Image (cartoon, helix red, strand yellow):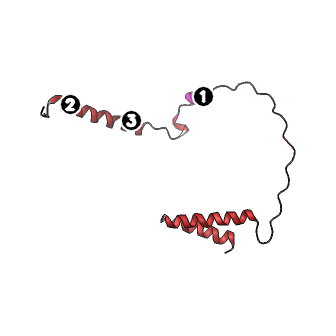
Amino acid sequence: MRPRLTYANVAATLALVFSISGGALAAQHYVITKVSQISPTVRAQLRGSRGPQGSQGSPGGSAGQEAPAATAGGSASSENLCGAIGEAAVLASERDEAGLETALGTIYENGCGE
């Protein structure tokens, strides 16, 4: 069977193009981006009325322990953080993300004292 350019083929193709472009246009035109675009009566219906208040929860546990003071040279957690920032800077340089590499390098230099 040879493909032919008939009226039915052209009409079907045009209908498909118009339906796709019309749907895309409608989706782009009717996007709600702010609460002010919604009618106040619709917002009130969406909000609904408040239900009954629930029962009181159980009391909390005892107070936790105080965190240990950091030493002059820094703590183990700050060393881990400095190592993680350094590794992230290396990964940023491997991925050619210059802005991120610069920002992480600045944080590393200022926060880790090197």
Q: Position of residue 15 (x, y in %)?
A: 26, 31
Report the side of 22 relative to 70 (left or right): left
Report the side of 15 relative to 113 (left or right): left
Farthest bottom residue in view: 114
Q: Position of residue 95 (x, y in %)?
A: 49, 63
Question: Alpha-carbon distance for marks 2 and 1?
Answer: 46 Å
Question: Alpha-carbon distance for marks 1 and 3?
Answer: 26 Å
Q: Main secondary structure of the magenta part?
A: loop
Report the side of 63 relative to 85 (left or right): right
> Does residue 50 show up magenta in the picture?
yes
> Does residue 56 show up magenta in the picture?
yes
Vertical order, 85 against 23 (above or below): below
- N-term-proximal mark, 1 vs 3: 3
Badge 2 marks a residue whose secondary structure is: helix
- N-term-proximal mark, 2 vs 3: 2
| Three-letter code for the amino acid on which mark 3 is drawn | Ala
Vertical order, 18 against 97 (above or below): above
| Three-letter code for the amino acid on which mark 2 is drawn | Ala
Q: Residue at x 81, y 68 (%)?
A: 71
Q: Residue at x 20, y 30 (%)?
A: 11
Which one is closest to the eye, mark 1 or mark 3?
Answer: 3
Specify start and end residues of the magenta stretch as a single range. 38-62
Badge 1 marks a residue whose secondary structure is: helix
Number of marks drawn: 3
In the rendered image, which quarter is residue 62 located in? top right
Q: How crowded is the residue under tag 3: few (<14 C-alpha within 10 Å), some, or many (20+)?
A: few
Mark sitting on residue 36: none
Task: Quickly name the residue at label 1.
Answer: 44
Q: Position of residue 90 (x, y in %)?
A: 56, 67
Question: Alpha-carbon distance for marks 2 and 3?
Answer: 22 Å
